[in-house]
């Protein structure tokens, strides 16, 4: 009798393990299908223009949600090129070089590569592609936000030394557009990026991604060419 009871417990454990494994595998497959659909949708556009806002909380540091108004920004993307306006700076990448224009200080740094993705920050310019490598993922919760059905995908960095603990990526199921990104840092900081407006296939000029050095020199900007391994956005967006 005891032997039969023990065998039953073993089989129950095995069945539970198999069910949980199958459920996790199904969640992973569903998440991959959804992320692939997002990627396909984004690639179908000639260009994208996004208005976004960012905010952060860190209760250990005494920073709570609602303490300050969200920080607004905007970005236009076309292929690898982008023009990002954020915190008084313009980040312009023409596909080869990155121009960081500080309008307050009238200084410009020219870097021979794009922003680095490996420094613990998900930059707005990488928002639509960051999840493709370096993350494990599964389906998260569904929320109804302002009448929109938002499916969250839970992403965990494969690199255990990452400064990012996890990311919740909210996707509008009607449009397959990314709506919200919630990033949790290992120092207790939670950063939230919300896309407030999304436009695609806009009539934009190529000059938006072209750096006119003469024009800035005439305005008295100091221009410095650098060769950093990475550049960092202001600390309000880092973890």
Image: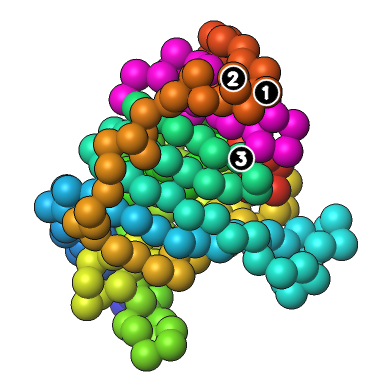
Q: Which of marks 3 and 1 is in front?
A: 1
Relative to 77, is 18 above or below?
A: below
Residue at x-position 37% and y-position 90%? 147
| Residues at discs 3 and 2 in contact (Cβ within 8 Å) | no
Q: What stretch is highlighted in magenta?
A: 95-115
Which numbered disc, 3 or 1, marks the residue that appears first in the sequence? 3
Q: Going by the image, does 11 lie left or right of 218?
A: left
Outermost residue toward the bottom in this view: 147
Q: How crowded is mark 2: few (under 14 residues within 10 Å), some or many (20 or more)?
A: few
The residue to which callout 3 is attached is 89
Q: In which quarter of the image is the C terminus?
A: top right
Asked if residue 36 can be seen in this view, the reply is no
Which numbered disc, 3 or 2, marks the residue that appears first in the sequence? 3
Residue at x-position 52% and y-position 52%? 166
Q: Where is residue 104 in the image (x, y as percent from the top left)?
A: 73, 38
> Which color scheme did the rendering employ for the protein?
rainbow
Is 112 within the magenta?
yes
The residue to which callout 2 is attached is 217
Disc 1, SS = loop
- The label on residue 220 is 1
């Amino acid at each position: 009798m005891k032997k039969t009871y023990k065998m039953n417990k073993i089989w129950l454990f095995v069945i539970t393990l198999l069910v949980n494994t199958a459920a996790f595998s199904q969640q992973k497959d569903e998440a991959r299908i959804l992320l692939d659909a997002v990627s396909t949708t984004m690639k179908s556009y000639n260009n994208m223009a996004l208005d976004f806002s960012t905010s952060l909380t860190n209760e250990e540091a005494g920073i709570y949600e609602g303490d300050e108004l969200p920080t607004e920004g905007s970005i236009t993307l076309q292929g690898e090129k982008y023009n990002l306006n954020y915190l008084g700076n313009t980040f312009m990448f023409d596909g080869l070089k990155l121009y960081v224009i500080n309008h307050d200080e009238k200084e410009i740094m020219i870097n021979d590569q794009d922003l680095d993705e490996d420094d613990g920050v998900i930059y707005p310019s990488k928002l639509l592609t960051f999840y493709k490598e370096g993350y494990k993922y599964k389906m998260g919760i569904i929320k109804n936000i302002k009448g929109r059905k938002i499916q969250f995908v839970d992403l965990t960095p494969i690199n255990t030394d990452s400064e990012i603990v996890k990311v919740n990526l909210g996707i509008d199921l009607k449009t397959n557009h990314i709506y919200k990104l919630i990033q949790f840092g290992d120092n207790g900081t939670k950063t939230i990026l919300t896309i407030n407006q999304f436009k695609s296939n806009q009539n934009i000029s190529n000059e938006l991604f072209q750096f006119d050095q003469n024009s800035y020199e005439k305005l008295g900007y100091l221009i410095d060419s650098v060769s950093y391994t990475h550049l960092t956005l202001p600390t309000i967006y880092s973890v």
